[in-house]
Image (cartoon, grey):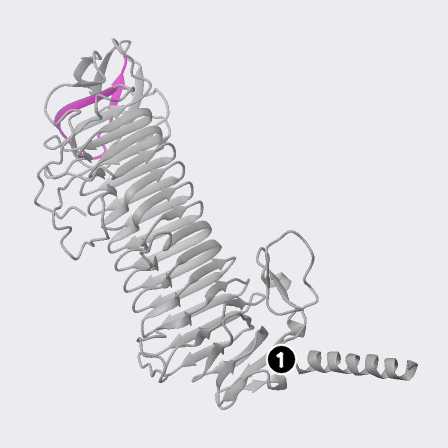
Amino acid sequence: MKIGYRLTALLCCVLLISCVLCSCSKTDTTATADTAKKTTVNTNVEIDENNIESSIDISLANRITLSDTKAQAENNCAKVDDAFVTIENSGVYLIEGNTSNGQIKVKTQDTDTVVLVLNGVNITNQSGCAIHIKKAEKAYIVPYNNTKNILADTSNYEFDADDTDGEPDATIFSKADLIISGSGTLDIDANYSSGIKGKDEVMLTSANVILDTIDDGIKGRDSLTIKDSDITVTAENSAIKTTNDEDGLGDMVLSGGNFNIECNTDAFNCKSNLTVESGTFKINAGDDAFHADSTLTINGGNIQIDSCYEGLEGQQINISDGNIHIVSSDDGLNSAGGNDASAFTGGREDPFASDMDAIIKITGGHIYIDSEGDGVDSNGTIEMSGGTVLVDGPESSGNGALDYTSTFTCNGGLLIACGTSGMAQAVSHTSTQYCIMANLSNLSGGTLFSILDSNNTPLITYSPSKSYSNIVVCSDKLKSGETYSVSTGGNCSDSCTDGLYNGTSYSSGTIQTTFTLNSIVTSNGGGMGGMGGRHNDHQKPFI
């Protein structure tokens, strides 16, 4: 009986060892037990999603080596056809080498996770995408350990018999959830369509991506999250976008990192809610810099928009923090319902329609706008309770520095809006903070104006960058019953940020008009005062 038990135990051990040896995946012994979110690759491998690269032990990965003539798959861990490699099992795969005509394809089970570690690869596919995640539950692409990795396609795509929907159509294409993370560089040259496209969720975290594309740059269908990454995109179409407009899907979140965007349409285009938490942005866009079909939220970041058609656009725009600079050929901030209508389509069917769900809400941050169209424009309402908003508005009379259909309630912060007098609007009388609206003789850009109290002490001094004939100033420094003057010209030796001086050294100006504040909005005539209502501007499309 003892011999029988020993034989049974020995057979069990042999079977267990055989299962381990036959597995194509290797065991990652670096995984640690902590509270961080982990993804199970297989029974023995976990990826720490808070520290993806460091949780991978490449010495235990399955090695694939590329060349122009023939790829090598260690231990037959993948199928090889010349330099075209198909991975059919979950696991961690180390990809090395160069090929001028090859591909990495993942075609596993729907429940499998695959990790592709790119260790200095250069892959061009002459007839399709460089990396194709055809079937899996989740795929990681890890540009590894400060290596440079180059992926490219050509304008010629040939599709498999079961690819009947015109896809894959991107240099990196994934039908699974896709996560890109690693200290190496991912350099993508997209010559057929998009650079990176995911049909489910897409995340880039601690990644360094340089992308040049003839169409869109990075596309996520159900969601797109970019965190603590360096992203450079040159795109003929949109740079970064989501595409799913179903309820609860299509959101975009940008958090940390650096973004350098050059594109011919939108820099960021979101089918649902777009949230900017932090990061540094430098943008040149042919259309909108940031567009959200639903809500655009800015909670922080340094945003430099050097050129665009419109700066920030969404049905609802919420700004709580951040340092935002916008140079736009049309509106700086634009709140309007419906899908994006670009600078190239002539605007919406009814460009002057009211949308009571449209709102711009500013509770903090520093916003400077240099606009040829309206500076701050809402088809519904505007609410401001904090922050600083400086508008160097239009020089043509068909637009206004401020433009709203319903009300502009200002209960806090500093608002300075400069532009022409013809279509000028001040804040609404529903505000609790006092406002001065002054029509002036036409003044050239760089000409200072200052609001002086009854003792001729400068309270607010500003230098618009363009010619102007109307100013709107709303500030907690303005008090009911007090008398104020508007002085123009002169000089100021205080430090200046975006035209706003921070001291009281203004002098040698000429008094243009004097007010005694007896209502929330006090004006010397002209403009539209605190009245709402879209001005009838048919010189440009309203988007």
Q: Is residue 9 left or right of residue 45?
A: right
Q: Residue at x 42, y 43 (%)?
A: 301
Can residue 390 be seen? yes
| Residue 176 % position (x, y) | 45, 68
Task: State the residue in front, 509 or 135.
Answer: 135
The quadrant where residue 415 appears: top left
The range drawn in magenta is: 435-453
Residue 22, above or below 490 = below
Q: Is residue 118 above or below residue 348?
A: below
Q: Is residue 492 visible?
A: no
Spot occupied by residue 245 in the image (x, y as percentages of width and height): 31, 56
Q: Is residue 373 above or below residue 117?
A: above
Q: Is residue 220 above or below residue 297?
A: below
Residue drawn at x 23%, y 45% as measured from the top left:
337
Report which quarter residue 374 is drawn in: top left
SS at mark 1 in the image: loop
Q: Is residue 295 magenta?
A: no
Q: Main secondary structure of the magenta part?
A: strand
Residue that mark 1 sits on: 24
> 365 or 277: nearer the eye?
277
Q: Position of residue 39 (x, y in %)?
A: 58, 62
Q: Amino acid at mark 1?
A: Cys
Identified at 40% across, 57% down, the residue is 223
Residue 539 location in percent, x, y? 8, 45
Q: Residue furthest front?
A: 1
Query: For mark 1, does the 10 Å Cα neighbourhood hold few (<14), some (14 to 19), or many (20 or more) residues?
Result: many
Asked whether 229 or 443 is in front, the reply is: 229
Q: Is residue 114 left or right of residue 300?
A: right
**Picture quarter with the N terminus:** bottom right
